[in-house]
Image: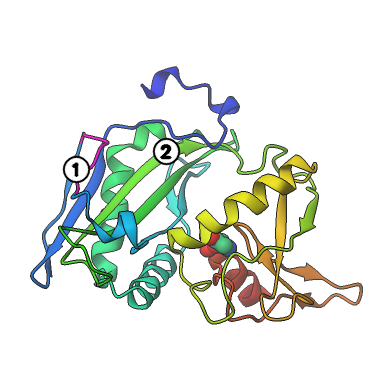
């Protein structure tokens, strides 16, 4: 119940909302999709998403503006990125209009869960596409599911807008010409241990180095890296193994 939420105490935990959106792809077409109250999915145990990592996700937010409007930040950029991931993993693309319509439907239906303006919270939106349907060999799935769920969240890093300490790691999250540019689960499973070790050593997260030479900064576990030099230049890595960040592209455009 949204009424029971203490907006200022929100962390980055999953809180159930009214409903989520699901749509299925079969025989070359997406169905219309619908909002469902069930927060569980029923899929085949042999689904490619469960064994071979054929799955992707996106992360974006809805904000309550001062004047009461609900704002999304460049959702089409996330829709396009999800389709770049889909191509890399041989999953069907989701039409941009379908993606944005799904996001809007879920946000509207869960409007009461958008943290009020000024609390620092937002409604986290998690679109996902996964391979479903019976399958055994390492091949692309016969069917796909596109879902969007939401959850009210506070700041991602506990300190909020305060400086954090990061440390470089010996591990890679993705190979140089691997799936670093795709927002797919495998990269994040690979990042759990390095993240955990960084946290145990007293840091907020780790910074990955370029996988080929380990001499240049690639990116952090869930964010691109950028810096302003003493002579006021915006610098950010160019690398085939990082996830192209909407935040970074937007900052580059502003610069
Ligand atoms: C999602 C993600 C980002 C940030 O992307 P934004 O579009 O700025 O939210 C950066 N790096 C990694 C590894 C990510 O998973």
Residue 104 or residue 27, whichever sits in front = 27
Badge 2 residue CB within 8 Å of ligand 1: no
Tell whether position 42 is magenta.
yes
Range of magenta residues? 37-43
Q: Which residue is mark 2?
A: 151
- Looking at the rendered image, the disc whose residue lies closer to the viewer, 1 or 2, is 1
Which quadrant of the view contains residue 37? top left
Q: Residue furthest left?
A: 27
Disc 1: CA contacts within 10 A as few (<14), some (14-19) or many (>=20): few
Q: Is residue 249 left or right of residue 48?
A: right
Residue 121: image tag: none
Q: Residue at x 79, y 56 (%)?
A: 167
Q: Residue at x 28, y 32 (%)?
A: 18
Q: Is residue 54 left or right of residue 58?
A: left
Q: Choose the circle earlier in sequence order: 1 or 2.
A: 1
Q: Secondary structure at mark 2?
A: strand
For the residues marked 1 and 2, what is the alpha-carbon distance in whole angstroms? 21 Å
Q: Is residue 200 left or right of residue 37?
A: right
* Quadrant for the N terminus in the image: top left
Which quadrant of the view contains residue 100? bottom left
Q: Which residue is mark 1?
A: 42
Q: Secondary structure at mark 1?
A: loop
Q: Is residue 224 above or below residue 161?
A: below
Disc 2: CA contacts within 10 A as few (<14), some (14-19) or many (>=20): many
Q: Give coordinates of residue 143: x percent, y percent.
A: 16, 63
């Amino acid at each position: 119940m949204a009424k029971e939420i203490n907006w200022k105490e929100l962390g980055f935990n999953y809180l159930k909302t009214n409903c989520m959106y699901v749509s299925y792809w079969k025989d070359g077409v997406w169905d219309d999709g619908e909002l469902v109250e069930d927060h569980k999915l029923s899929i085949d145990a042999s689904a490619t998403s469960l064994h071979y990592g054929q799955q992707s996700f996106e992360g974006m937010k809805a904000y309550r503006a001062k004047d009461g409007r609900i704002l999304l930040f460049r959702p089409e950029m996330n829709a396009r990125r999800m389709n770049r991931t889909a191509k890399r993993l041989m999953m069907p693309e989701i039409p941009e209009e379908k993606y944005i319509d799904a996001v809007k439907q879920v946000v509207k239906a869960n409007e009461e869960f958008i943290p009020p303006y000024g609390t620092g919270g937002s409604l986290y939106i998690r679109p996902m596409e996964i391979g479903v349907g019976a399958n055994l060999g390492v091949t692309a799935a016969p069917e796909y599911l596109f879902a969007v769920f939401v959850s009210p969240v506070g700041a991602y890093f506990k300190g909020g807008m305060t400086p954090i300490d990061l440390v470089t790691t010996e591990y890679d999250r993705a190979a140089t010409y691997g799936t670093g540019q795709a927002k797919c689960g495998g990269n994040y499973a690979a990042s759990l241990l390095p993240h955990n070790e960084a946290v145990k050593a007293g840091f907020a997260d780790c910074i990955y180095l370029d996988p080929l030479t380990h001499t240049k900064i690639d990116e952090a576990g869930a964010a691109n890296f950028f810096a302003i030099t003493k002579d006021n230049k915006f610098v950010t890595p160019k690398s085939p193994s990082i996830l192209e960040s909407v935040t970074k592209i937007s900052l580059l455009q502003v610069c």
